Image (spheres, grey):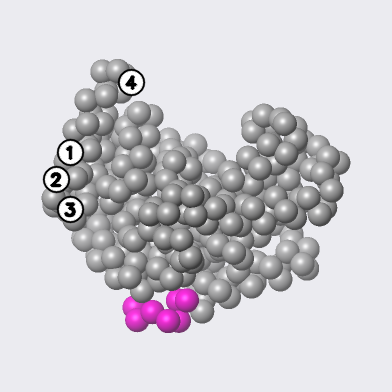
Amino acid sequence: MKKITVVGAGNVGATAAQRIAEKQLAEQVVMIDIVDGIPQGKALDMWESAPVELFDTAVKGTNNYDDTADSDIVVITAGLARKPGMSRDDLLFANTKIVKSVTEQVAAKSPNATIIVVSNPLDVMAYVAYKVSGFPKNRVFGMAGVLDTARYKLFVAQELGVSVKDVSALVLGGHGDSMVPLVRYTTVAGIPITEFISEARIEELVKRARNGGGEIVNYLKTGSAYYAPSASAVDMVSAVARNSKRILPCAAYLDGEYGQKGVYCGVPVKLGSNGVEQVIELKLTDEESAALARSAKDVEENIKKLDL
């Protein structure tokens, strides 16, 4: 992999660029932002850590999309962050404008790139990037399920006092209050979670996962989460860059799968060098199907508000 571009040099973008460089997922990482000096300074600072962290990836900061030309992967983190009291949907119109502009320039300079969207409201922004880029659906998808699942897995591990490595879980649906954790697929070393935790307590952990981003926003006051979101985005970048065929929950374009059409929603997919190489369709219970349909409907209603 020759070049990976991260759009946005804020906390999420800069941390993602650092992780990509340290994991040596490409020969060069380009970080682009509209603010003069910020991507250049942060990129140079990162690159100067190379002799300590022992990576050979070059790190470049820029304000010019010419420097992003011929990127293999583009991670879009640009957009406004949430503040206390704001929902992800509150960001809808402002971030649509930003993601639309970014995508137009990315698509023009890197027509063969895979686009991974991180900007909120996530599922709608993935749809915006898909429509504006004109790229095939397998090359435009969003980061949400990996992050939501990570939060859920951590809370389960904390509850039981076990290693996060032994917790397996899956969270579907939109990135927000309508996400759908599949409790029956949650296991600890292969043992169903219901063997350890009561249903009422599981629901409390699910609720905390749903509100995971908001909990952090309330602490930070002037910003939102970035360590876990950047790690989750880079997990997806790694799957594409290394063609590792990971099964990860991502915001993917559904074209009939799960009874949904023309909408982005969090589902398990196989990620490799061709992006979303397969949408894995699980047999859901009636209750799970209804929850996923409600989640997709929330995304559809926000898409209808846009002028694309």
User: Mark 1 and mark 2 in contact (Cβ < 8 Å)?
Assistant: yes
In x, y percent, where is residue 65? 17, 53
Dot 1 amino acid type = Gly
- Crowd band around label 1 with a 10 angstrom C-alpha radius: few (<14), some (14–19), many (20+): some
Compute the Cα span from label 3 to label 2. 6 Å
Dot 2 amino acid type = Gly
Magenta range is 302-308
- Provide the residue designation for mark 3: 35
In the rendered image, is residue 233 in sight?
no
Compute the Cα span from label 4 to label 3. 27 Å
Q: Is residue 6 above or below residue 106?
A: above
In the rendered image, is residue 5 in sight?
yes
Image point (69%, 68%), residue name: 291
Image point (38%, 79%), residue name: 306
Q: Which label's residue is closer to the chain start, 1 or 4? A: 1
In x, y percent, where is residue 183? 75, 52
Q: Which label's residue is closer to the chain start, 4 or 3? A: 3
**Residue in front for this viewpoint, 111 or 218:** 218
SS category of the residue bearing label 1? helix
Image point (70%, 41%), residue name: 156
User: Mark 4 and mark 1 in contact (Cβ < 8 Å)?
Assistant: no
Quarter in which the N terminus is drawn: top left
Quarter in which the C terminus is drawn: bottom left
Rendering quarter of residue 102: bottom left
